[in-house]
Image (cartoon, helix red, strand yellow):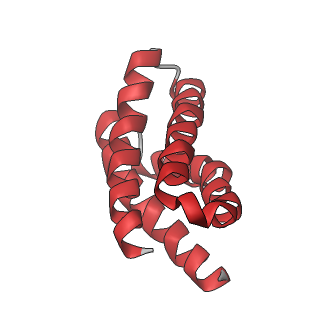
Amino acid sequence: MITYFLLAFALTNLIEFVPFNFFVSGKAKNNLLFILVINSITLPLIWVFLPFFFENYLFFFVLFEIMIFLIETILIKIITTKELLFSAKTALVMNLLSAFIGYFLF
């Protein structure tokens, strides 16, 4: 289980770094650190709680992704000091990519 989590964590960071770095100006090194911090907070939510809802997996997967989108929007807003709409668009692209890929891989 821990191996899959670490693999998912690494892939999520790689996948979400690309749109985050594209949308958010700044040094790539700082942007990677931001992504690592954000995903350290949000990725465990899915990995810890989603297995409890296996019977309704798809429903709860979508529900958790929406919650993570909202949390990441707020974190991006705080970290970048950009407008809320900008943060929401960035979080949406990041999460659509990682959720789509993650759903089919894991």
Give the percent coordinates (x, y) of residue 97: 32, 52
**Height in image: 74 above or below 38?**
above
Give the residue furthest to the front.
55
Give the percent coordinates (x, y) of residue 92: 38, 36
Quarter placement of the N terminus: bottom right
Give the percent coordinates (x, y) of residue 13: 47, 60
**Res. 25 in view:** no
**Res. 36 in view:** yes
Based on the displayed image, in which of its 4 quarters is residue 40 positioned? Answer: bottom right
Residue found 49% across the figure and 50% down from its top: 59
Between residues 28 and 59, which one lies in front from this camera angle?
A: 59
Residue found 57% across the figure and 38% down from its top: 67
Between residues 49 and 31, which one lies in front from this camera angle?
A: 49
**Height in image: 18 above or below 66?**
below
Give the percent coordinates (x, y) of residue 85: 40, 17
**Height in image: 18 above or below 91?**
below
**Height in image: 81 above or below 41?**
above
Residue found 40% across the figure and 55% down from its top: 99
Q: Is residue 49 left or right of residue 43?
A: right
Number of numbered callouts drawn: 0
Residue found 45% across the figure and 15% down from its top: 83
Quarter placement of the C terminus: bottom left
